[in-house]
Image (spheres, rainbow, N blue to C red):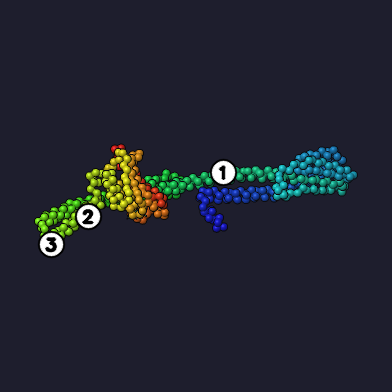
Amino acid sequence: MKHLQVIWGKLSLSFRVMVGVGLVMALVGVLLITNIVRSDIKMEREQFSQRTGELLDSIRISISEMAVVGDYTTIRQMLRTRVTDSMLDKISWVDPSGNVISEELQGELLVAPKWFQELVGISPIMESEAIEVGGTSYGAITVNANPTYVINRLYDRFIFGLVTTVAALSIMFAMIVSITSNALRPLKSMVAAARRIETGDYSVRIEPGGSREVREAISSFNSMAAKVNSLLALQRKLAGRMEEVREEQNKSIARELHDSLGGNLTMIKHGLDTLATEAGRDHECQPKIQSLLALSESTLQLARGLTSALRPSMLDSLGVMPTLQWYAKEFSRMTGISCHMELCQGVTCPKNNETAIFRIVQEALTNVARHANASRVSIQACLEDDHLVLEIADNGVGLPSQQTANGETRSLGVISMRERAQYMQGKLDISSAPGYGTTITLTVPVNQRGTA
Ligand SMILES: Nc1ncnc2c1ncn2[C@@H]1O[C@H](COP(=O)(O)OP(=O)(O)OP(=O)(O)O)[C@@H](O)[C@H]1O
Ligand SMILES: [Mg+2]
């Protein structure tokens, strides 16, 4: 039973409606036909013996009237007419002298099948009556009534009832199925629309239709999708604005580090250089000055490193592609992972998306260094159908198996890469197979002049 419930639960609603309605219709049909046939049979059964009795009576009266005057020819004619016109198969009259006058007809062929004959249950009747007029006996009359005619007529009515009931029920069934499937059709579009929303297409809307309730559900669904869409647009705008603010901050900190700290440290270094020259061969001062010189040099390097990490200055001066080529070399030098960048011909990038593209590649390379255990990573930037396609592929361990290509992750790196891609109206795909490395593909639309 539980098994059946599980299977039933898995069937689609329209199929369940069809099966349910079909069963109810079949039941109604069977009850209807059974009822009609049963009352018909009951009536015919009662009338069959009653009619036989009535026929016997009327024949007896006719014979007695004619027998009194000895009109045997007319009696024979009358018997022939009766046997032709009625349901009687045979009528026999034995006159007072023992002569038998009988009329017989080949009974009608039984059309109804045996089971129907048994269902009707009417048996042939044979009835006899003595004929007496004014105390004188005129013999006896016997009639044989055959129910074949009645059974055939009942069977014809049964077939007609069956055909009309099945036809009527089929029309009703077709109407109910068409009404329910029309009513359910908008639900199917809602499911399809929800699936598209699941894949990130929030622009999807459902054509209003169906019953009032369904139209209300569609309108709620559409306004929900519109709200989610506008919230996401707002979120993207905010994320973009935050990105701009962060980059501005990075820029100004990098400028301060470069101008103030870098400038001051350079001055200190120069001062120490002068001091070292003036101190000459002072054995006490010289080592202290030299160690201060080394310290200021390493602090200067540190400041340069920080400046570049916050925002490589060449991003503003040379653009993203040369910066990425420089960054790839730096990455190789720092991590020991071979990193090669290939640029297809004519690839350029506009100023407003350069930082986002640089940050995406930066995070992808950081992930390679942190998680991939790779020995090689390649970066390729090409133009394909008005799109800048940037591919970062490593030969590392690949993503952990529970993390699907475009699935959810709780860490922020991949999320912010995706957000940056969306902000540029582009998309980010991650493909990976355990043991076969990871490939990140960034696709960003580029306008006619070749700018993303
Ligand atoms: N190139 C790669 N090779 C193997 N696994 C990777 C690669 N890039 C990302 N991953 C896996 O994807 C996960 C999510 O990366 P993501 O950058 O979002 O987070 P994270 O690097 O762990 O932390 P953070 O938020 O600091 O970036 C990582 O924890 C890692 O398991
Ligand atoms: Mg990361």
Asked whether, in this view, residue 263 is left or right of residue 388, the answer is left
Cα distance in 3D space between marks 1 and 3 = 114 Å
- Report which quarter residue 261 is drawn in: bottom left
Cα distance in 3D space between marks 2 and 1 = 87 Å
Where residue 126 sits in the image (x, y, percent)?
A: 80, 48
Judge the density around disc 1: few (<14), some (14-19), many (≥20) Cα neighbours within 10 Å.
few
Asked whether, in this view, residue 115 is left or right of residue 257, the answer is right
Name the mark nearer the viewer: 1 or 3. 3
Number of numbered discs visible in the structure rendering:
3
Q: Identify residue for label 2.
A: 302
Q: Identify residue for label 3.
A: 284
Cα distance in 3D space between marks 2 and 3 = 28 Å
Judge the density around disc 2: few (<14), some (14-19), many (≥20) Cα neighbours within 10 Å.
few
Q: Residue at x 76, y 43 (%)?
A: 87
Asked whether, in this view, residue 78 is left or right of residue 305, the answer is right
Q: Identify residue for label 1.
A: 171
Quadrant of image for the N terminus: bottom right
Q: Secondary structure at mark 1?
A: helix
Callout 2, which amino acid?
Leu
Q: Secondary structure at mark 3?
A: loop
Q: Is residue 256 visible?
A: no
Name the mark nearer the viewer: 2 or 3. 3
Q: Residue at x 47, y 46 (%)?
A: 185
Where residue 8 sits in the image (x, y, percent)?
A: 53, 53
Disc nearer the start of the sequence (2/1): 1
Q: Is mark 3 within 8 Å of ligand 1?
A: no
Callout 3, which amino acid?
Glu
